[in-house]
Amino acid sequence: MNDQTQLLRKLPKIDTVLKSINSDIITGIPIVIIKAAVRETLHAYRQAILAGDDIDIPAGNSAWTAILEAAILKKNSPNLQRILNGSGVVVHTNLGRSLLDRSTLESLQTAATHYTNLEFDLGTGKRGSRYALVEEIICDLTGAEAAIVVNNNAAAVLLALNTLSFNKETIVSRGQLVEIGGSFRIPDVMSRSGASLVEVGATNRTHLFDYENAIGDETALLLKVHTSNFRVIGFTSEVPAVDLAGLAEKHNILTMEDLGSGSLVDLSPWGLPKEPTVQEIVKAGVDVVTFSGDKLLGGPQAGIIVGRKEIVERIKKNPMNRALRIDKFTLASLESVLRKYYDFESVMDSVPTLRLLTLPPEQIRRTGQRILRRLGGIRKNAPLIQLVSTVSKVGGGAMPEHTLDSWALILDCKKHGASWFEKWFRSLPVPLVVRIENEKIVVDLRTILEEDIVDLITVLRSYLEEEKGD
């Protein structure tokens, strides 16, 4: 009998294992999930044995029971989990981007648990437009004549191009033909929209005459694109929106600007780079502006299109719009967030993304000191945890070169090493996502929420026990 056969015989039978599982642990879990978790776990061991992997087979029913109970609980747990963000990236694309505040959650709850006037005009008693729920607010805040919201900014760009430049030419600077996360490439989106791309200028410098020389009978649109995480520095030049709008008006064609993250607030007074706000681009005379709802705006995933009324109306009537429209949950949360911008005095505190971006470093340092005191004091844990100044990032493709002064807990990880602990933190019931720098774990406190602190302390205590244990 070969080794593989011996190992395979050590695998328990499903019926035998099911009888040994603690009924209190699996109470309320559907039998379909229980059987699937047991079957998948045993199958994984079987495949590893057949592949010749170096694998330890649990000895005895109690060991198998513990493994399979854990597998059942995991399979019955939600796939979308809450995590602790210690990365320091405020608008973290992989971690859900912008956070919503408590009052916005109340709006979501209303939309989820009650009938609403999603497409019902309470004044006329007839069918209404879902866009009307937020259009007036968006126009108030941006100065635009009309607005429409779709499911993300990529959809907004696709829909606008398909409406305004189908089988026509759209002129774009070569320096703006970027690819952002998820392989979203401007040339590919333009191709799918039916617009013909006309490249002008050079990668680092594009002038107004480059656009004008390219305008022909088939030109429908001049497009300006935010370059997201891509930057060209040094000997560079690009055409301001107001000049591009003037050129388009001269030739009786349209202008469109994809602002990417899009911001309704100038963040430069808080030490961040000056980015054009949506209001500024609208005021410059650009016909159509698109931007995200879930980045610097701080709302849910959405793509917002604003501009001249007759143009936005054309976009609304595009049959493709039906496939890209937003649902009641996005509308409810977006309206709640947008209304906060009516009060510019308090919006920096009431929108979590803006609050995290503008947190004073000293406040973050005090949070770190409070955590260390709860862990027994700075001196007690100094060899393993230290509070050190660091830098955070904005994230979400916005302001790629800019960093935010912050403070972090640095974990020395002498016993197992940083890579081992980074993976271990991700396996916890409430996972902690961190950075690794110089073979040490960095827990950037800018993105640790006040309600996260108790759980973070629990995680750090587990880390200290692991490091100090035999």
Image (cartoon, rainbow, N blue to C red):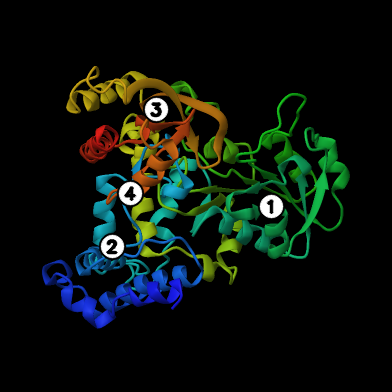
**Residue 99 figure quarter:** top left
Give the structural element (helix, strand or loop) at label 2.
helix
The residue that label 3 is drawn on is 358
Instruction: Name the one closer to the observer, 145 or 185.
Output: 185
- Amino acid identity at mark 3: Thr
Sequence-wise, the earlier of marks 4 and 1 is 1
Question: Which label sits on residue 186?
Answer: 1
Of callouts 4 and 3, the N-terminal one: 4
Q: Where does label 2 land, which residue?
A: 111
Q: Which quadrant of the rendered structure holds the C terminus?
A: top left
The residue under label 2 is which amino acid type? Ala
Q: Which residue corresponds to mark 4?
A: 336
Q: Can residue 265 be seen in this view?
A: no
- Dot 4 or dot 2: first in sequence order is 2
User: Marks 4 and 3, Cα distance to the nearest angstrom?
Assistant: 21 Å
Q: Decide: marks 2, 1 in contact (CB < 8 A)?
A: no
Give the left or right position of residue 380, taking residue 164 as reference. left
- Residue in view at x 45 percent, y 60 percent: 54
